[in-house]
Image (cartoon, rainbow, N blue to C red):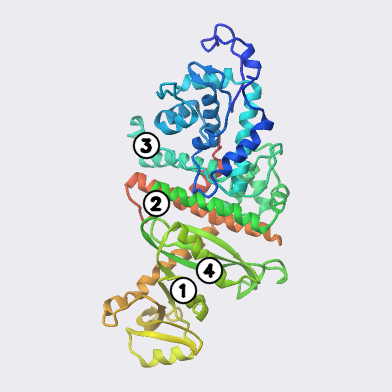
């Protein structure tokens, strides 16, 4: 936090500058009323770019040019403080190190002389400037620029560049245990994720509110991790963390239901999912140049209320109900990178073909798709033709309708029926039908029996390549990655009996986001510790969630 403290005479930090400079706003510093349109204009110039370099944006913001501080331009010093706040840098030493290592950023901020020589301030210079030389008006201007910038960035749906925190272990830490090293690095990554994700997520909380947005989201993380209901979760959080003042369940639900629309919630989470993906991309967990296998699936959150309530759909009877909320998601299903790229809600009037096309279009902006794995729900003429139109290689189980049942009885396994046609003249889908046989253990008597399985695909299969044909079921097992992700997401989902769909959507999307952050951070640690992606987790979901809600952003 920036403070304006006066040191006593004789202190080693005492300033030779006249005290009037500490209380008088330099005339060349722009006022808040004139800086707002400049911020709008500067940020609007970055529209269409994938990400914005903060220093390039600040270079367009004119500040005090008339004064210097210890041979450093005052304008550059003020810009560096704004960068510090926007990047979530906590200490002057960390800022000094950043400026020293990032020459282009330092030049953009204005740290060069008339001979174009670069010179950056050290920790003591930054500390003295922040604590002694900033005027109250300049502090207010800095806070205004930071808050207004974050507000406009969200409004324009822009992104600042991501700088992943360094995870190197110092020489003094070499002899520490592996668990201790992991814990320290996990703290860094969780704090970084929290500082960058929380601004995107959720609901509006005014700057003068009693409770901060950070506290609300910490509580939501706690409730989600404990899979508790909002009412008891808020009370338990208060007891466990010994908080004297803590928002109630009513406060939390009020802020969620206060969000303008379902679309608003959806858009905020799109930005948060984008951040998680960029973090995976920047850290090397995901390589945009390589092709990956993906899966699409529907999931239902069962509902015990009125079927006429908003977004409630009919579903297969389970656990005493045949109603629920439906969501569709697209996941990467490779080991070590099982990210959920996007989750979309499904309503009564949702056009499924349009929904799938949008989902795949969004994914293709991020990755190159190798194969698409889907379940038998997608075994339909329109859906298969859509996948072929989008030039997707797909694999799915075929529904054993009357015609396919007859074929399965008379043909041996393994067999490939090339260019199998489903449908009638004028409306049909063409694909390869693969029949394989494998052992299945009966759930009733425990006996192992041979059973035929049928798959639909447009993979170009050689009819004589029996080895590959027999591997089709093993290939399809990749789809279970999305099933595993749904099971893990339930461990991050808060419980609720609310009939308000905004609450349901918020809780479901937040569970998917927490899952994503856990996968990315766990994979980054795996890369850092082992030098490669690993198939097991270094950090449990419970450990990740606990650190996330107990870690202060500014601590």
* Front: mark 2 or 1: 1
Q: Secondary structure at mark 2?
A: loop
Q: Which mark is residue 389?
A: 1
In the rendered image, residue 204, in percent from the top left (x then y), is placed at 68, 46
* Front: mark 4 or 1: 1
The residue indicated by pointer 3 is 168
In whole angstroms, how far apart are the C-alphas of marks 3 and 1?
47 Å
| Chain-order first, disc 4 or disc 2 | 2
Cβ atoms under marks 4 and 1 closer than 8 Å: no
| Chain-order first, disc 3 or disc 4 | 3
From the viewer's perspective, tell me whether residue 447 is left or right of residue 140.
left
The residue indicated by pointer 2 is 285
The residue indicated by pointer 4 is 356
Vertical order, 515 against 466 (above or below): above
Q: Which residue is at the front of the view, 227 or 476?
A: 476
| Chain-order first, disc 2 or disc 1 | 2
Vertical order, 231 against 431 (above or below): above
In whole angstroms, how far apart are the C-alphas of marks 4 and 1?
12 Å
Task: Specify the farthest residue to the top.
Answer: 10
Q: Residue at x 56, y 37 (%)?
A: 552
Q: How many marks?
A: 4
In the rendered image, residue 231, in percent from the top left (x then y), is placed at 69, 52
In the rendered image, residue 148, in percent from the top left (x then y), is placed at 63, 38
Q: Secondary structure at mark 1?
A: helix
């Amino acid at each position: 936090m920036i403070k304006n403290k006066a040191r006593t005479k004789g202190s080693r930090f005492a300033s030779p500058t006249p005290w009037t400079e500490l209380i008088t706003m330099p005339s060349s510093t722009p006022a808040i009323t004139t800086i707002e349109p400049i911020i709008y204009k500067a940020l609007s110039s970055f529209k269409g770019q994938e990400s914005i370099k903060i220093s390039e944006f600040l270079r367009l913001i004119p500040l005090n040019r008339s004064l210097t501080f210890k041979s450093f331009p005052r304008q550059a010093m003020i810009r560096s403080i704004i960068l510090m706040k926007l990047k979530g840098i906590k200490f002057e030493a960390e800022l000094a190190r950043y400026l020293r290592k990032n020459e282009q950023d330092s030049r953009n901020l204005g740290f060069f002389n008339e001979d174009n020589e670069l010179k950056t301030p050290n920790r003591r210079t930054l500390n003295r400037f922040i604590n002694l030389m900033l005027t109250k008006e300049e502090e207010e201007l800095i806070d205004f620029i930071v808050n207004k910038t974050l507000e406009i960035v969200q409004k324009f749906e822009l992104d600042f560049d991501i700088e992943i925190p360094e995870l190197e272990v110092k020489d003094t830490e070499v002899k520490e245990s592996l668990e201790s090293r992991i814990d320290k690095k996990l703290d860094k990554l969780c704090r970084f994720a929290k500082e960058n994700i929380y601004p995107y997520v959720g609901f509006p909380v005014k700057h003068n509110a009693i409770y901060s947005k950070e506290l609300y989201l910490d509580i939501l993380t706690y409730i989600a991790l404990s899979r508790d209901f909002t009412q008891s979760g808020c009370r338990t959080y208060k007891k466990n963390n010994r908080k004297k003042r803590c928002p109630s369940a009513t406060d939390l639900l009020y802020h969620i239901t206060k969000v303008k629309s379902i679309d608003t919630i959806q858009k905020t989470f799109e930005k948060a999912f984008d951040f998680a993906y960029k973090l995976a991309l920047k850290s090397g967990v995901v390589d945009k140049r390589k092709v990956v296998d993906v899966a699409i699936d529907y999931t239902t959150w069962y509902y015990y209320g009125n079927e006429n309530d908003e977004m409630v759909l009919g579903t297969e009877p389970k656990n005493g109900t045949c109603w629920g909320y439906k969501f569709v998601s697209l996941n990467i299903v490779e080991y070590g990178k099982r990210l959920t790229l996007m989750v979309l809600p499904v309503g009564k009037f949702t056009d499924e073909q349009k929904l799938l096309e949008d989902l795949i279009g969004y994914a293709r902006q991020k990755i190159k798709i190798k194969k698409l794995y889907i379940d038998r729900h997608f075994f339909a003429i329109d859906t298969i033709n859509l996948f072929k139109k989008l030039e997707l290689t797909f694999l799915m189980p075929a529904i054993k309708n009357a015609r396919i049942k007859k074929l399965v009885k008379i043909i041996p396994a393994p067999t490939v029926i090339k260019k199998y046609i489903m449908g009638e003249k004028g409306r049909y889908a063409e694909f390869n039908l693969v029949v394989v046989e494998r052992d299945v253990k009966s759930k009733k008597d425990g006996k192992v029996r041979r059973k035929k399985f049928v798959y639909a695909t447009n993979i170009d299969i050689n009819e004589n390549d029996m080895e590959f044909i027999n591997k089709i079921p093993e290939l399809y097992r990749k789809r279970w990655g999305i099933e595993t992700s749904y099971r893990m997401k339930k461990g991050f989902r808060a419980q609720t009996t609310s009939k308000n769909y905004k609450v349901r959507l918020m809780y479901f999307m937040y569970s998917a986001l927490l899952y994503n952050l856990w996968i990315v951070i766990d994979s980054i640690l795996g890369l850092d510790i082992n030098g490669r992606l690993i198939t097991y987790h270094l950090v449990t979901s419970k450990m990740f969630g606990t650190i996330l809600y107990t870690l202060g952003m500014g601590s």
